[in-house]
Image (cartoon, rainbow, N blue to C red):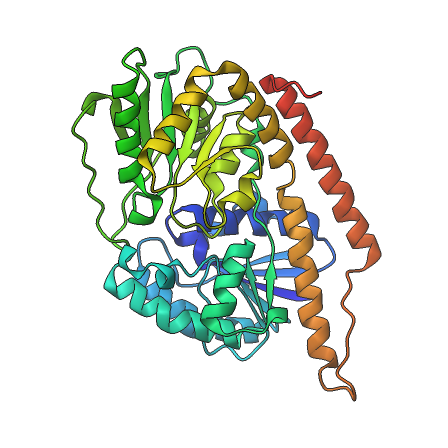
Amino acid sequence: MRIGINGRFLVAKKTGVQRAAYNLIRALVSLDQENEYFLFTSHEELSKPEWQRPNVHVIPSGIMPGHTVKNILWEQLTLPFLARRYRVDLLHSPANMAPLFYRGHSVVHIHDVCFVVNPQWYSFAFRTWYTWIIPRLARKAARVITNSNNSRNDLLQFCRLSVRKVSMVYWAVEDSFLNNSSSQGEDWPEKDYILYVGSLEPRKNIRTLVEAFQQLRRNHPELRTKLILIGGESPLFAEIKLNIVDFKDDIELKGFVDDPDLRGWYRNARLVAYPSLYEGFGMPPLEAMASGVPVVTSSTSSLPEVVGDAALKVNPCDVTELSEAMGRLLQDEELRTQMAKAGYHQVRNFNWFRVARNILAVYYEVCQKSRTEDTEDGEHQSYIPMNAWHKLIRMEEERIRSFQSGSDRRGVVME
């Protein structure tokens, strides 16, 4: 197969969707040596080591960071021309957006439809554009992929799609969170803090988290725990106003941090709190569990799918319930150890080799269906060549063994 990749996500700000798309494509090209990949992106990607493979072709053209309108026009007008020019069998857009008028076989990742479920959380321009284009992209695509059953159900309802057209493939955690080597020295600036990681937007429910933290400190004056908020605001989202009255000096907004520092903030936290109201998947709880840190998160949307029984789940609208859950984890060392052990078992179910294997299965099914839809009965049977499938399974097993070794180094002792 000749697989085209919409690489616009590589020039966008690196938030959760972009990070996941990058990890997916990197895993695909590292595992799959049977097919050709054409990565349509910016000139900056030409020299990146992850794309230096015999079957990977970086096709640079006129997109670059910080040029949003220009990049949108490139995606809608230039990208379809490039895909036809390089005769790709399918074009995969892994970060929500795809060229609407592309006539070839298109696979598009749509992470969630939060802009429909709660439109008040987004700017007027953003929600209007997404509400118009997402159903059209989904209905036009050969296959839609999303990353939780919760999002799949929302997509089926909102976009009026056939059940067979939407594939669910869970995301995974970056290998770097399993590496114990970075940003974990004795001179780490903080050791006693609750960590939040994510965008500063209304659906993340940060105001409730701040109120719960203040209640926790008032009810337990012996605690000196801080609250660290990592993430940035975006004009795409509605404004968020934090009502910080008490303990102002113990609530710190760090903005965006680079990856090595982010891993350090995770590993040195007492716990990670993620009381989001709605998630397509919810990567921070998974990153926390991979870092050996207990988690308090919401009992709603996709988050129970991600954390299973390996986190304390609360009603995200109940300040007292959230405050008490954080207090339990801070004060009960046995519970903290239990949650870290459960987190280990849970996170090993989410690895990028498995994701790549499932995405590759979608590619083969889409391409084979296109070859048989003109036959007499229209029936088809999708498959991945057995040698490629077994190779992917072996590499996944190696990844799990590597994870086991990394957990042992972090001191997560398994029974």
User: In the rendered image, which quarter contains the C terminus?
Assistant: top right
Between residue 73 and residue 129, name the one nearer to us: 129
Q: Is residue 407 visible?
A: yes
Is residue 377 toward the left or the right of residue 22 in the image? right
Residue found 27% across the figure and 49% down from its top: 234
Is residue 389 toward the left or the right of residue 309 in the image? right
Q: Is residue 270 visible?
A: no
Q: Position of residue 292 (x, y in %)?
A: 54, 25
Q: How many marks?
A: 0
Q: Position of residue 362 (x, y in %)?
A: 66, 63
Residue found 44% across the figure and 72% down from its top: 135
Between residue 131 and residue 38, name the one nearer to us: 131
Q: Position of residue 407 (x, y in %)?
A: 62, 24
Residue found 49% across the figure and 65% down from its top: 155
Rendered image quadrant of residue 318: top left
Q: Residue furthest left?
A: 245
Q: Residue furthest bottom?
A: 376
323 w.r.t. 29: above or below = above
Rendered image quadrant of residue 233: top left
Is residue 94 toward the left or the right of residue 66 in the image? right
Residue found 56% across the figure and 31% down from its top: 290
Q: Position of residue 321 (x, y in %)?
A: 37, 33
